[in-house]
Image (cartoon, rainbow, N blue to C red):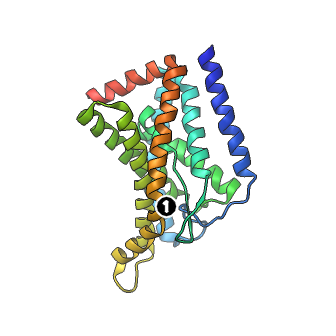
Amino acid sequence: MKARKSLFLLLATFGLTSYFVVNTPQPAHAMHIMEGFLPAGWALFWWAVFIPFFILGVRSLIKITKEAPELKLMLGLAGAFTFVLSALKLPSVTGSSSHPTGTGLGTVMFGPLPMSVLGSVVLLFQAVLLAHGGLTTLGANAFSMAVAGPFVGYAVYLLMIKATGKPKLAIFAAAMMANLSTYVVTSLQLALAFPSVEGGMLASFAKFGSIFAVTQIPLAISEGLLTVLVWNWLQRYNSEELTSLRRRMKGVVQS
């Protein structure tokens, strides 16, 4: 009962923070690709690439909720964590803005496929409520933040667990790399759509990447530390849910 109350308080805190984020004016020029910015062909391409991952993610979520119904609250926590962190736009010295992604926590809990659904739902709400990103570019934004980031983060998590046997270090590295890989993929998407006249796609990739790199690296480190702190909180107050998660995670690592 105490664990349930503690989880409810954390979710309420995330919800209250979300309310202030939604009702605070934010700059629309951020790491999410804005509405109408991508050429139609590239927008459709990224939708086509993203949709199969979304379908597999839905199947994965259905399986999780059937096998372990007690994890539904944890899924909600992972979604709320992603929404709040990815909605916090921070000014960049390069003239744009940057943000955490929040996908690392859900990735180490449930794997990358469920995050393709949770992350894309988050991006949909942000596009509609906050003017961050857009509907035509949702496929591209979801692929970078809800697919590429979680898959890279999860691969890093598994490698770190096998190499060091230290879960907290693995969680930190996973959250950090999920963040960094998202901005790398976004830079690649923009470079492919808008190759430089001089230097082509590679020059354009370097240009777009440099826009976010200055602020994204410290943000990624900060997100990794925050994710570990939240995990420590979960260990302290939510033993039942974490027991189910550990069984799932142990099975994946051993396989």
Q: Residue at x 38, y 21 (%)?
A: 247
Residue under label 1, please give it: 215
The percent coordinates of residue 120 (x first, y second) are 54, 48
The percent coordinates of residue 31 (x first, y second) are 53, 62
Q: Is residue 50 visible?
A: no
Q: Residue at x 67, y 60 (%)?
A: 131
The percent coordinates of residue 215 (x first, y second) are 49, 61
Q: Is residue 28 visible?
A: yes
Identify which residue, 111 or 81, lies in the foreground.
Answer: 81
Question: Tag 1's secondary structure?
Answer: helix
* Image quadrant where residue 205 sits: bottom left
Query: Residue at the top extreme?
Result: 1
Q: Residue at x 70, y 53 (%)?
A: 129
* Image quadrant where residue 175 sits: top left
**Seen in the image, is 157 located left or right of residue 122?**
left
Q: Dividing the image into 4 quarters, which one contains the N terminus?
A: top right
Q: Residue at x 42, y 41 (%)?
A: 112
* Image quadrant where residue 113 sits: top left
Identify which residue, 190 or 228, lies in the foreground.
Answer: 228
Query: What type is the residue that disc 1 sits on?
Result: Thr
The percent coordinates of residue 27 (x first, y second) are 66, 64
